[in-house]
């Protein structure tokens, strides 16, 4: 009898203390939309992307982006293209033909160029500084400093942050931890913020999708948050220590490893698009929320309608407070901050001439819960 009572107690304890979907707020994304932003494209621009920086100046409020070697400046919230500058690829002010990431602050641009150097320029395209990327540990073999996989370059105070994202996972990477780079713009010195991949990362060698991670800097904690494609947990890096934080969906996920195929001297990566996958991670400044996108299930070869995505919303204490269905045919899975809310690409209102973004107030979640 005591054994039965104890078993019931244990069952009740874990059912009450495990992450419960009942505590998560149910809300529709549409109920959080407060406005729509329209940005006009010019004849040279096919895709504006969603990597914008907002700045208020003495002459007005503006959104800036860097795309196709051009710095574009839009009035906010009118969305008019008020200024642009095309950067040179060669010569004394050449930034190279391949830019893998950028950060625009109130005075300078920081560019990751050719996989070799970090460049600082002014808005007029004048190259002010060039710094070779930090040396790579032999265990890493090569570096891929990039904003791919939803990893914006970020800056806080004098420090610029960017990451090294491997194309695919290789043996030895489970013991490597120098994936994050810090550049002090005053001392002009490089350092690292370190973190390890989950222990099971080697199960996904040869998959060029499930080895990715997404990184965001949290100013209120002065810490870095990393989300891996294959892990429910997030990693919080603060003061040199790594801590895992539960941040998964309540749904069952199935990570399905892709395959590779040799074609002559090349290896072709064939990911399994039916696989579940955690994707973009971002921080909403206005509401102090963390956003985490997840593909619950990918499309099958016969039925694209099987594909489902969700958006997880973490409160300032880094607890998942809500998760909502996310239609990737309607919304883009990444956005940017404005003083009015978080801007998400709105595909259904975008045209060849205009790109639309919905402004979402994630701080209103508790007001519009079902």
Image (cartoon, grey):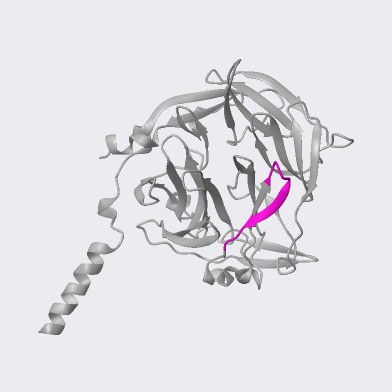
Q: Is residue 106 shown left or right of residue 332?
A: right
Q: Position of residue 230 (x, y in %)?
A: 50, 62
> Which contiguous range is marked in magenta?
184-195
Compared across the picture, whether 92 is left or right of 30 comes to right
Tell me, yes or no, if residue 368 can be seen here.
no
Q: Is residue 229 left or right of residue 126?
A: left
Counting every numbered tag in the picture gives 0
- Residue 198: x, y in percent? 52, 67
Residue nearest the viewer, comparing 271 with 247 = 247
Reply yes or no: does residue 181 show up in magenta. no
**Looking at the image, which residue sits at the far front?**
187
Residue 271 picture quarter = bottom right
Quadrant assignment, res 197: bottom right
Residue at the left extreme of this rendering: 1
Q: Residue at x 21, y 72 (%)?
A: 11
Q: Is residue 185 magenta?
A: yes
Question: Along the line of sight, which residue is nearer the eye, 347 or 105?
Answer: 105
- Residue occupying image coordinates x 60% and y 44%: 152
Measured as percent of width and height from the top left, residue 370 is found at 25, 40
Give percent across and percent down for residue 1. 9, 84
Give the vertical position of 20 relative to 218 (above or below).
below
Between 181 and 338, which is closer to the camera in this rendering? 181
Residue found at the very far top of the displayed protein = 59
- 269 or 32: nearer the eye? 32
Examine the rendering and report whether any part of residue 321 can be seen: yes
Q: Is residue 21 above or below residue 28?
A: below
Horizontal side of 287 relative to 194 (left or right) equals left
């Amino acid at each position: 009898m005591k054994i039965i009572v104890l078993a019931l107690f244990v069952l009740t304890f874990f059912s009450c203390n495990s992450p419960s979907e009942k505590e998560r707020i149910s809300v529709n994304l549409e109920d959080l939309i407060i406005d729509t932003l329209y940005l006009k494209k010019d004849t040279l621009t096919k895709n504006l992307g969603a990597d914008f920086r907002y700045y208020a100046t003495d002459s007005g409020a503006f959104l800036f982006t860097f795309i196709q070697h051009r710095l574009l400046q839009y009035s906010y919230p009118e969305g008019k293209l008020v200024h642009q500058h095309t950067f040179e690829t060669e010569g004394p002010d050449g930034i190279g033909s391949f830019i893998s990431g950028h950060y625009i602050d109130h005075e300078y641009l920081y560019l990751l160029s050719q996989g070799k150097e970090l460049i600082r320029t002014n808005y007029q395209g004048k190259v002010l500084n060039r710094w070779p990327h930090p040396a790579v540990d032999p265990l890493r073999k090569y570096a891929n400093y990039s904003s791919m996989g939803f990893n914006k370059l970020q800056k806080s105070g004098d420090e610029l942050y960017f990451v090294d994202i491997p194309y695919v996972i290789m043996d030895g990477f489970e013991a490597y931890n120098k994936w994050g780079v810090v550049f002090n713009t005053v001392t002009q010195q490089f350092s690292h913020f370190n973190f390890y991949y989950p222990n099971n990362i080697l199960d996904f060698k040869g998959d060029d999708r499930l080895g990715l991670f997404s990184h965001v800097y949290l100013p209120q904690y002065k810490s870095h948050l990393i989300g891996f494609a294959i892990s429910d947990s997030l990693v919080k890096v603060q003061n040199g220590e790594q801590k895992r934080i539960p941040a998964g969906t309540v749904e069952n996920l199935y990570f399905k490893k892709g395959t590779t195929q040799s074609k002559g001297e090349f290896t072709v990566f064939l990911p399994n698009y039916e696989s579940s996958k955690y994707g973009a991670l971002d921080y909403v400044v206005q509401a102090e929320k963390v956003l985490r996108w997840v593909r619950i299930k990918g499309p099958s070869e016969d039925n694209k309608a099987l594909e489902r995505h969700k958006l997880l919303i973490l409160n300032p204490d880094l607890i998942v407070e809500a998760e909502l269905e996310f239609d990737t045919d309607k919304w883009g899975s990444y956005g940017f901050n404005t003083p009015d809310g978080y801007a998400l690409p709105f595909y259904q209102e975008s045209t060849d001439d205009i790109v639309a973004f919905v402004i979402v107030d994630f701080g209103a979640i508790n007001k519009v819960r079902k």
